[in-house]
Amino acid sequence: MAVKSRRTLLLASGALLAVAAVVVPVVAGAASADPASANQPRIVGGDKASLSDHPYAVYLTDGGGNQFCGAVIVSSTAVATAAHCAKAVAKQEMHVVAGREDKRTDEGDVLSVSKIWISKGYSDPTQGDDVAVLTVRGQLDYRPAKLPDSGDAAAYSAGTQATVLGWGRVADGGARSDYLRSAQVPVVSDSDCRSDYSMYDQKTMVCAGYEKGGVDACQGDSGGPLVVGDTLIGIVSFGDGCGKAGKPGVYTRVSAYVDDIQAQAKSRIF
Ligand code: 4AZ
């Protein structure tokens, strides 16, 4: 989710397209004036990615069938995403699309959602607890991401190279990607992220990105995975724009929610 004036872009559901159409040109103008983006045609700064490397990467569609967020398979019946994604679209309209790298194809599976769990205490991404688990109808026949355990604490240390995946915008205010993309971003120290974002909470959030910007998650990537190897350390949550210098991406710190995610991953409502 974008902080400041870009909250309208977050939901990006069909109902908000008219609003987005007005907001996008303004944002695009601001982005091209930004020195960090001037020499970086792609703010995400990544490249096309393959589901054979990351089969757990999935996306969410709204009632119009439009991709609005990312998510990540955590079991054969459940995906984790951001709470702000889970709240953006009614459960009855939401679908999970798995096994489809290119949105323009009908590859893979489209599953409906039977249950939504949202982290207790969630109010707004900038307040933390931006995590949800969706239980699907049917089976997710794709390898799930691993959840971190106490042995994975080092994955959160500054400088660890992590991979963010998604179908979101390839530039601040730009078009969404039809194809799955990934980018490598280093984990940022808690002290640096606290100076980048006054609301940063190291218990529930983790930051990743370069001080000079240029490589980042962006609108539409929310809810998607930040992995180290196949271990899910973060969920795309918010940021001030995309790829701006001194404004890394902020992710939900998955290690703080493993017990909840695990419990939801096992539960099944038919
Ligand atoms: C969003 O609005 C969003 N640069 C996601 C990630 C970031 C910013 C905004 C991080 O979904």
Image (cartoon, rainbow, N blue to C red):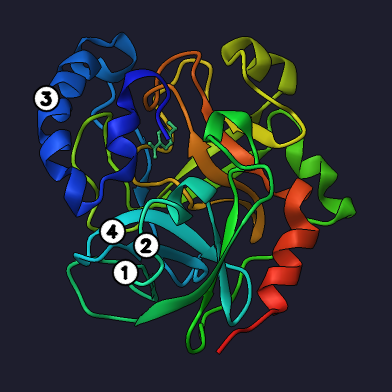
Describe residue 23's horizontal placement relative to residue 161 as left or right. Answer: left
* Vertical arrangement, residue 93 with respect to residue 148, above or below: below
Measured as percent of width and height from the top left, residue 230 is found at 64, 61
* Vertical arrangement, residue 145 with respect to residue 21, above or below: below
Are the two marked residues, 4 and 1, in contact with CB atoms closer than 8 angstroms?
no
Quickly name the residue at label 3.
25
Kind of element beneath mark 3? helix
Q: Nearer the viewer, residue 39 or 217?
A: 217
**Image depth: mark 4 or mark 2 in front:** 2
Quickly name the residue at label 2.
90
> Which residue is located at x 71 percent, y 23 percent?
189
Quickly name the residue at label 4.
67
> Which residue is located at x 29 percent, y 19 percent?
37
Q: Earlier in the sequence, mark 3 or mark 2?
A: 3
Answer few, some or many: residues within 10 Å of disc 3's Cα (few below 14, many 20 plus, some between 14 and 19): few
Residue type, mark 3 in image: Pro
Are the two marked residues, 1 and 3, in contact with CB atoms closer than 8 angstroms?
no
Residue type, mark 4 in image: Gln
Mark pair 3, 2: CA separation:
28 Å
Describe residue 112's horizontal placement relative to residue 223 as left or right. Answer: left
Q: Nearer the viewer, residue 66 or 208?
A: 66
